[in-house]
Image (spheres, rainbow, N blue to C red):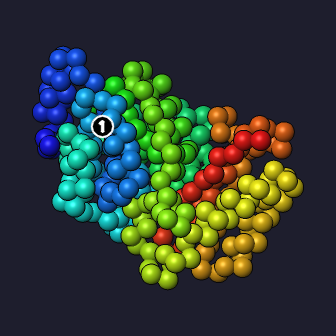
Amino acid sequence: MHIFKHSAELLDFVRHQKAQGKTVGFVPTMGALHKGHISLLEKSYSENDITICSIYVNPIQFNNASDLDKYPRMPEKDMEMIKHCCDVVFLPNNEEMYPEKPSEEYDFGHLDKVLEGAFRPGHFYGVAAVVRRLFEMTEPHNTYFGLKDYQQLLIVKSIAKQCNFDINIVPCPIVREFDGLAMSSRNLRLSKEEREIAPLIWKSLNNAAKILLQEGIEASKDFILDTFANNPSFKIEYFEWYHPEKFIPSQQSDEQFVGLMVVWLGEVRLIDNIIIKK
């Protein structure tokens, strides 16, 4: 497994591989890897000749300094986990990623102004800045993103279009724990008691989906609000039904829906979603 800390050396390596006709897959991560990340890497490994994993905690996508400070970092453990499904690890530092303060502009329309964009001002600009740079540094044929961060996936697709990247963006299913909790690096911060009740998030999403189909959107939203009002360990930040492609609030007449939820459990912010079709 090759390890690079400087983008110029990485790019030389990538271009040499591509000149030999090899395909390159890329999985960007912020480390603290889990089975969800591994599933992305394994998919890339099975579909490409070379798979690159970047591990970089991007400071400018955190709008909460405390969240950045508490984000788990374990690069040695991460690299041990991925050695069976990764050819190249990219470990840049802040100076490598941002020799100058980002100043480019993006136009995401309404995408960066609702839900995550509204509750985390500046977050998607940080995502855009780092993804753009990582794409430029790795020049992959294919890149893999999990569907858990659904809105972020749409932002990444928009970045690729705005910057004219010829990269195939591959959405991958959410990987869950045995009890339904969506895998996340932030799960490591849950206490034992919090971890035991966290599956309520996925359970409530499934029940809300059934209610939407039987009784309608408002009834399903009322169910979610009541569920978490009766479980004071949780604090709901938002729950909405959106059209999966247009990413606007759903109408009951729609044929497909994505239910997007964020809740706080103690000091940990957890995100999840469910996609359904009539």
Q: Is residue 131 visible?
A: no
Q: Is residue 165 left or right of residue 89?
A: right
> In the rendered image of this protein, does residue 188 appear above or below residue 175?
below
Where residue 165 sits in the image (x, y, percent)? 39, 23
Residue at the image position 20 percent from the left and 39 percent from the top: 87
Q: Nearer the viewer, residue 175 or 269?
A: 175
The mark tally for this picture is 1
Residue nearer the viewer, 105 or 29: 29
Q: Which residue is painted at 65% across and 39% down in the image?
A: 244
Residue 78 versus residue 241: which sits nearer the camera?
Answer: 78
93 relative to 265, above or below: above
Q: Secondary structure at mark 1?
A: helix
User: Percent from the top left, x then y, of residue 61?
Assistant: 41, 51
Residue under the point 67% across and 34% down: 246
Look at 56% across and 76% down and name the residue there. Answer: 197
* Residue 169 horizontal/vertical position (percent): 44, 31
Label 1 environment density (alpha carbons within 10 Å; few <14, some 14–19, many ≥20): many
Report if residue 169 is visible in the image: yes
For the view shown, which residue lies furthest in the bottom direction? 193
Query: Quarter of the image containing the C terminus?
Result: top right
Instruction: Name the residue type under label 1.
Output: Tyr
The image quadrant that residue 35 belongs to is bottom left
Residue 17, percent across and down? 18, 24
Outermost residue, right direction? 215
Quadrant occupied by the N terminus: top left
On screen, residue 10 above or below 1: above
Q: Nearer the viewer, residue 277 or 57?
A: 277
Tell me the residue that label 1 is attached to. Answer: 45
